[in-house]
Amino acid sequence: MSKIKKFFSRKKAEAAFKLNLSGSGMGTGHKLNSPKQETPSSSSRQKYEAYVPPKRNEISNEARAAASAALARIDKKTSRDFNTSLSAVKAQAKRELEAERRQREEAMGTASTTSTSTSASGGDTRNLACEGVFFRCPLISEEILPKSVWKVRIKEFLYQQLEADRGLTACLIIYNCNVKEKADECIATLIRYLENLIKNPEEEKFCKIRMSNKIFSEKVRYVEGALDVLQAAGFNEVQIDDEPFLLWTKEQIEKDLDLPTLVEALKSSEIIPLELDRNIKVLLPSQARRVVLPDEFYRLSPEEIKKEQQLRTEAIAQSQMLRTKAMREREEQRNLRMYRYALVRVKFPNGLFIQGTFNVYEKIADVFEFVQSCLADESLDFSLVSNSEGKLGDEDLEKTLYDCKLIPNALLLFSANDVPAPLQTDINYLKEDLLMLVQAM
């Protein structure tokens, strides 16, 4: 696996170097015998953080000092306007809380049907709770994209590396550009070919492969990346008696690569991981009424979801029938298995909400960490309360959202443990940059 990690480290370094070359400048120089300057590490970023916009070019120290001085002067003149703006947000939240309180009985009566009637909106995206499900791929870049776009980007990235690192790149292409069943069968067959060569390099039958062979045709020939692995291993296509063969010679093995290393790469390569982005949002009470989820949250296709809803409608007529506890639990589990992702909202005492996207198998501890990362005071001791599970304690931290039935969407109530209840509604808990998101929406 170290070969694969080195491969990605090298590619990221090359990409960074090219980016510097194509930028506005090469940066400041330094003497060869001068002490090495320390650079901040990107790995120190916390696991869950608010969306980070693309980096801009660094400004000079003089410009930064001038900007700070200007901002300080502006703050003295406009601090009253800023406070008024925050007060307006709080006032708006309070007004909406009053309206929400008046509609609570009606909302509770329709919540169960609303939360599951998502994709039946016929493509209407006006009431979607979020735009979709988004991911990062730190091995390639820090962009935030849908999974379908990342699949295309990953494939393009790998094929761009073929000429320079054919063997290792082709192993990754097999894993990332084919369905799992095909990839697994192909890998097993390639490993058998190469291990036979390692053990018996002089035996003729292991040095050539008939391309019309049934096993080769079914498991290797049409799998993306497979022929590139064989080419890196030293195989070349030739004609023998007017029939295509792959013929192996030791001299044709890719430079700086040997067969045992290639076998190890085939065994240790894996799918390039994507990290789920929280897609954080800060909402007013009126905005938090949107609970329609996009199709990406479902394991089923939109057509399958509609069919499922029709079956539920037909089952309503039978809802008056007595059902055993086991029957009810089976139906509940069947409904929960429809979802891949969960939308978690946390309501603060001042009426604001934060919203994040989670995998249904992420843990309650991940939700606490997400909330903590949004707080202005990250050391604040707080509790989260679920309508269904009650107060979430230490014994719940290792449970998943699926275990706690906090899917497909869940509302958790935030409470500051060391703050008296009457005072909690007047506190701004969120970081200032998140509060500004409320004003912009």
Image: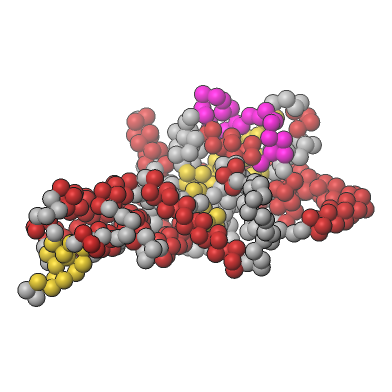
Q: Does the magenta stretch include residue 190?
A: no
Relative to 185, residue 18 above or below: below
Q: 350 or 163: nearer the eye?
A: 163
Region in magenta:
374-397
The residue at 72%/35% (across/down) is 377
The number of numbered discs placed on residues in the rendered structure image is 0
Residue 177, percent across and down? 34, 59
Q: Can residue 230 be seen in this view?
A: no
Q: Is residue 389 magenta?
A: yes
The residue at 62%/51% (across/down) is 51
Residue 359, percent across and down? 47, 44
Would you say 427 lies left or right of 217 here? right
Q: Can residue 379 be seen in this view?
A: yes
Looking at this rendering, what residue extends furthest in the bottom direction? 242
Residue 316, percent across and down? 40, 45
Q: How is the image coloured?
A: secondary structure
The residue at 79%/55% (across/down) is 61
For the C terminus, the quadrant is bottom right
For the N terminus, the quadrant is top left
Q: 20 or 227: nearer the eye?
A: 20
Looking at this rendering, what residue extends furthest in the right direction? 77
Would you say 293 lies left or right of 169 here? right
The residue at 42%/53% (across/down) is 7
Looking at this rendering, what residue extends furthest in the front direction? 33
Residue 350, percent across and down? 74, 39
Relative to 220, residue 325 above or below: above
Q: 298 or 145: nearer the eye?
A: 145
